[in-house]
Amino acid sequence: MKKIFFALLAIFALACCTSNNEKVQVERPAFLQPGDTVGLMVVSSPVNHRPGETDTLIDVVRSWGVNVKCGKHLFKHDAVPFNVTDKERAQEFMEMVQDTNIKAIVFYRGGYGAIRTLEYLDFDIIKKNPKWIVGFSDVTTYHLALNKQGIETIHGPMLSSYWLRKRPDSAAISVGEALFGRCEGYKIKPHPFNKFGEATGKIAGGNMTLISIAEGTPYDMEVDDNTIIFIEEVGESMNAIDGMMQQLKKSGKLAKAKAVLVGKFTKIDDTEDPWGITPEELIKKYTDELDVPVVFGFPAGHGRPNVAIFLGRESTVKVNENGAEIIF
């Protein structure tokens, strides 16, 4: 019996090893065509715009040449602090995933709450019906979860980020270009903290707080030797940023990165425990230890410009004295 037990144990261990090392096949949703339908919903905080503002923002989406379908719970406030319950928000997402007329899902806003809905999602169905999702901030949670399933997503501004009066709106244009497959990459001006080099890998990441919250869960950011890490943050303290950088370092994620994209760090509070340096200077201390290309001033995150980027896609980063370039 012992021999049989250990033989079975060895087979089980081999199976687990094979599963863990197996590469997830990347699925790229179909790009939009004129006349396609885009679904609008929230999985985080509720919409707080006035009706006139909401109509204007929805018209911005229509200006891409698409139809719009608003989620049935989009404007509700029935389950404070959310619009509806966690399960109902997840169900609405799944309904849009399975709606063959909807070709992409653009989240109206972030805030907080996306992580509470993950347990109600059916990832088998999502993988069978891949479509673009667009958002950032709290939607980082969905990027991490879907990228882990091998589905490409778009980290980009949501309706609450669009300008109400200024035209053209660069944020909205950026999302439209990405959804229609017309976004091939970006050129970024030089930054004194950049590290020169060239690397190719899949971009992963988003908001640092959400990356940190996912640590140790099934939705933890997956970093292997083919990963480009992207980070951004808003409204946190320098202590928190350092703690999250420590987490990236001590978890081994930072050391595995083929490149690092440092996005916007806005409204960072340094009053309680002054560090005497900027968030970028703090992050530089960590990236100086790496022998990979690093891009500071990457134009994505909370603030403007906030360009749309593809997560989970094999991309190339080039950094030299003339600046940086990312090619999707």
Image (cartoon, rainbow, N blue to C red):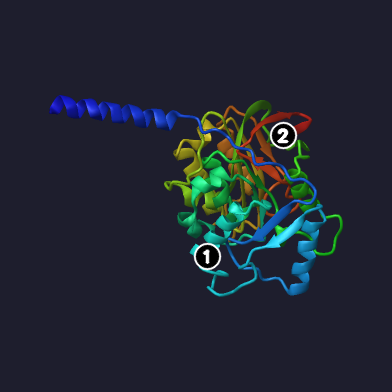
In the picture, the disc for residue 326 is: 2
The amino acid marked with disc number 2 is Ile
Local crowd size for mark 2, using a 10 Å CA cut-off: few (<14), some (14–19), many (≥20): many
Q: Residue at x 33, y 26 (%)?
A: 14
Q: In the image, residue 154 lies at what x, y percent?
A: 66, 46
Which amino acid type corresponds to the residue marked 1 in the rendered image? Glu
The spot of residue 123 in percent (x, y) is 50, 47
Residue that label 1 marks: 88
Residue 47 lies left or right of residue 274; in this view the side is right
Residue at the spot 65% in from the left edge and 68% down from the top edge: 47
Res 247 visible: yes
Q: Decide which of 45, 63 is in the foreground and name it.
A: 63
Q: Quadrant of the C terminus?
A: top right
Instruction: Please give the name of the residue rendered at 52% of the width and 41% of the height, measured from the top-left corner.
Output: 149
Could you say which quadrant of the image residue 18 lies in? top left
Measured in 3D between alpha carbons, the distance from the residue under mark 2 to the one under mark 1, in whole angstroms, is 38 Å
Locate residue 102, reporting x and y percent. Answer: 67, 53
Residue that extends furthest to the front in the rendered view of this protein: 100
SS state under label 1: helix
Is residue 100 or residue 42 the one in the foreground? 100
Seen in the picture, residue 36 relative to 228 is either above or below; the reply is below
Question: Mark 2 or mark 1: which comes first in sequence?
Answer: 1
Residues 56 and 217: in front is 56
